[in-house]
Image: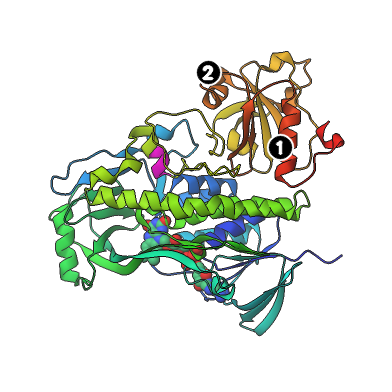
Amino acid sequence: MSSPDPVVIVGGGPVGLITALGLVHYGVPVLVLEEDDSLSLDTKAGTILTRTLEVLARYDALTPVLAASLRIDEIGELDRASGRSTGSVLTERLAEETRFPFVINIPQHELEPVLAARLEELAPGTLAMSHRLVDFTDHGDHVALEVDTPEGRRQLRADRLLACDGGRSGVRTHLGITVEGHTLEQRYMLVDLVCDLDVASPRDYPYLAYFGDPQEWMILVRQPHCWRFLFPLSPGQPEPSEEELRDKAHRFIGEVDSLDVIGTNVYSVHHRVAARWQVGRVFLLGDAAHLITPMWALGLNTGVLDASNLPWRLAWVARGWAEPSLLEGYEAEQAPVAINGSGEMAEAARAVMDRRLESTDAMAAGGWGDAMTRTLLGVRLDVDGSGDWSMVRRTPEPTPVRLGERAPDLRVFGAEGPVTLHELCRDSFVAVHLTDARRRPEVPAECPPGLRQVVVSRWDAPHDSDLRDRAYFDPGDQVRRRFDAAGADRIVLLRPDGHVAFHQPWSADAADRVTRHYLALIGRPATEEANR
Ligand SMILES: Cc1cc2nc3c(=O)[nH]c(=O)nc-3n(C[C@H](O)[C@H](O)[C@H](O)COP(=O)(O)OP(=O)(O)OC[C@H]3O[C@@H](n4cnc5c(N)ncnc54)[C@H](O)[C@@H]3O)c2cc1C
């Protein structure tokens, strides 16, 4: 029997590589085509948010990325003139929410080789360098590709084609998809420099610090091997000379012993989103689908939300567990987040930096809400098509988890020891019965493929209950209380990406209800047998 056609990803940038890691995690055959003979050498994205760390952990790629990064527990906000803190975001507020209550700094050109090496370890030969997609045709049951390779032009077959080919996406152009939005008049300048702010000229800046000022703002980022300054250039302003750059740096950080500029980059800032993200068997992801201002790390990290949402859908379809209609949820959920969510945050970010504080409603929560928003953990997806989604958390304290939110990664204890909610659902939908295990709730052991049902209870499942292999002990009832403020019983369905797909009061028929919901989601009719 011939092997199935692979999903082909065009583009070996961060979104293409992480999407490939996702497909490998789910066991879907995948090939990545990268036109260049080396990964990008440009100084681009530099901060990876917590949400992205969780995706990398799910795809078994986090450890090498952390080894190459600097971890940060404070996103600093400082007033440039006085140097005083104006309200840092402390990621310790997230200690109950995630296994990774921090963000990391790593330049994109150091991240990409780490991702590529991990991909090579997990699925050797997946990344094909010097392979340029030049043409494709969607035949309805596969996509035919024309690819320029070092050995000449080749024809390939793809099960599906994922365009991770960046802001100038050729795939998007080929499909005639328009891009809507605007480009800011301001350009941003990024400067990498080496100076000793630890010993020779000690400073206590957070490793990621936003210096706000009505006249001139700047972001200071400590990278593993240098410091990075990022600031806006007024329309028409020429690129500063090295001398001017030094003066500017001194204005922000004061006199220092020595300061060497090792790299610069000037770039335009866009907010442009593709009108469609799926046409037949072809999908757009990352910058190909949305060019977002990189402010508050919303460029690469918004792309990784795409790489979190699409791979499990493709896997469910490839495994024969779901109808292709499941794939339509990708654009429906992610496009609003990119069009309005990232836009809302980026506008708020600029307002904070320009000290137009009356326009910073999106960031008004303080504390927990800020931390959830700024680390992207606060993204709530429109999972039921109601139009109710959000990227911004507006409450200073944790609120009960709602439909569409990413579940907090709380720890419970199973037969094999401790496990977190995200680990539970890393390769499966999991229906969680938040009810009293002593009362012998019906939690079926047999479920449709791709679904498991478990009970989470502060009452350890009795040994004669037949539930011990699918019961999780929740000391203190913390999970149920996070899903319902009054501590009432709930039935919730977690997706493989950790988002909540179903959230209702628990009752004796909860197992049937959640199974029917799952079957509707994957496009399979609820038969008598499946419901039993
Ligand atoms: C200066 C700068 C600073 C930035 N700073 C930040 C930041 O601080 N935080 C943040 O989150 N984001 C930042 N960004 C944005 C971030 O770099 C992008 O969002 C990210 O690179 C998008 O990744 P991608 O994989 O979608 O696309 P890309 O990184 O653009 O990768 C696309 C890949 O596709 C390949 N390709 C294109 N066409 C073909 C073809 N026909 N065949 C085969 N291969 C092809 C290209 O060679 C390329 O390798 C910054 C961007 C810039 C320019």
Residue plotted at (71% across, 26% down): 510
Label 2 secondary element: loop
Tell me the kind of residue under disc 1. His
Q: CA distance from mark 1 to mark 2?
A: 25 Å
Q: Of helix, strand and loop, which mostly describes the magenta segment?
A: helix
Per the rendering, the mark at residue 203 is none
Tell me the kind of residue under disc 2. Ala
Magenta segment: 371-375
Give the x, y percent position of residue 251.
Answer: 14, 56
Location of mark 2 (residue): 486
- How many marks can you see? 2
Give the x, y percent position of residue 227.
Answer: 29, 57
Q: Report if residue 26 is visible in the image.
A: no
- Left/right of residue 493 with respect to residue 394 in the rendered view: right
Location of mark 1 (residue): 517
Residue plotted at (78% across, 52% down): 320
Q: Nearer the viewer, residue 12 or 416?
A: 12
Q: Is residue 173 above or below residue 249?
A: below
Give the x, y percent position of residue 385.
Answer: 59, 45
Label 1 secondary element: helix
